Image (cartoon, grey):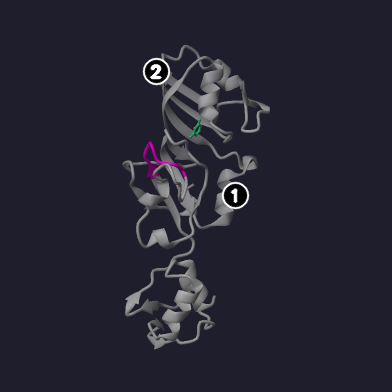
Amino acid sequence: MRIDKFLGNLKYGSRSEVKRLIKNKHVMIDGLQVTRPEHTLDPLKETVTIDGLSVFYQDPVHIALYKPKGFLSAHHDPMHPVALSWIQEPYSRFDLSIAGRLDLDAEGLLILTTDGDLLHQITHPNHHLPKTYEVTLNKPLMHSESLLTGVTIHDGHGNPYLAKALSVEHQGIHVKIAIDEGKFHQVKRMFKAVGYEVENLKRISIGSLTLGDLQPGEYRLFRKEEL
Ligand code: URA
């Protein structure tokens, strides 16, 4: 990869700012000064410094974030605080995609990744990756059979869809439900279809990856094999 592209991708400035940094001799690769923006490097093998400070690089980056309520599953938004604002340096420099959004008023496990294949694996409906949610309802759940056999909800385009839970455990207003699809507001819509309102929604796992001891706003790196 070209050094100007590498530094630009990591948000060290616009393409022209980065070129200037290089031409003005601020950048070294493995201790040797580079002055040509088109100089190529292998960022996994070579170490880049800017004014003597190393540039962190990792590929891929997978992050499990505990999204708190009130944060939009987005990078930027004019109205609401965003989930990505929790991510600090050096990971905030990476081009992270959100693999399966959570509603503004929902909390819990949000996966961020630089890996397009992983993103696809998590979000593509054909992959049927189970996701588990802890839900608080407006009144005690009486029976779960219809959630397991399937309830008709409408997807984001208004098309009817038979949504089935993989498992449902419940005690009073507290329910743990697993689904392996990810239609728009699916969990809320499934409960609405059987006469309940969701008052709190927390995603606690995606595949085998769990929220663990993460607290709201905290994150950790994970490996693909943990999913
Ligand atoms: N289902 C919902 O209704 N909301 C979410 O955020 C996730 C699943």
Give how far apart the Cα atoms at labels 1 and 2 are: 34 Å
Task: Give the residues in magenta.
Answer: 66-73
Q: How many labels does the image show?
A: 2
Q: Position of residue 105 (x, y in %)?
A: 42, 33
Q: Where is residue 155 in the image (x, y as percent from the top left)?
A: 62, 30
Seen as rendered, the residue at the extreme right is 159
Inspect the magenta stretch and tell me whether residue 6 lies in it.
no
> Would you say 214 lies left or right of 194 here?
left
Q: Of 4 and 138, which appears nearest the observer? A: 4
**Amino acid type of the residue tagged 1 in the rendering:** His
Give the secondary structure at mark 2. loop
Q: Of 218 and 213, which appears nearest the observer? A: 218
Q: Of 183 and 222, which appears nearest the observer? A: 183
- Residue 54: name its quadrant: bottom left
> Would you say 202 lies left or right of 146 here?
left
Disc 2: CA contacts within 10 A as few (<14), some (14-19) or many (>=20): some
Above or below for 5 versus 137? below
Is the N terminus in the top left, top right, bottom left or bottom right quadrant?
bottom right
Q: What mark, if any, has residue 120 been given in the picture?
A: 1
Dots 1, 2 in contact, CB < 8 A: no
Q: Position of residue 62 (x, y in %)?
A: 46, 54
Q: Which residue is drawn at 44% across and 46% down?
A: 78
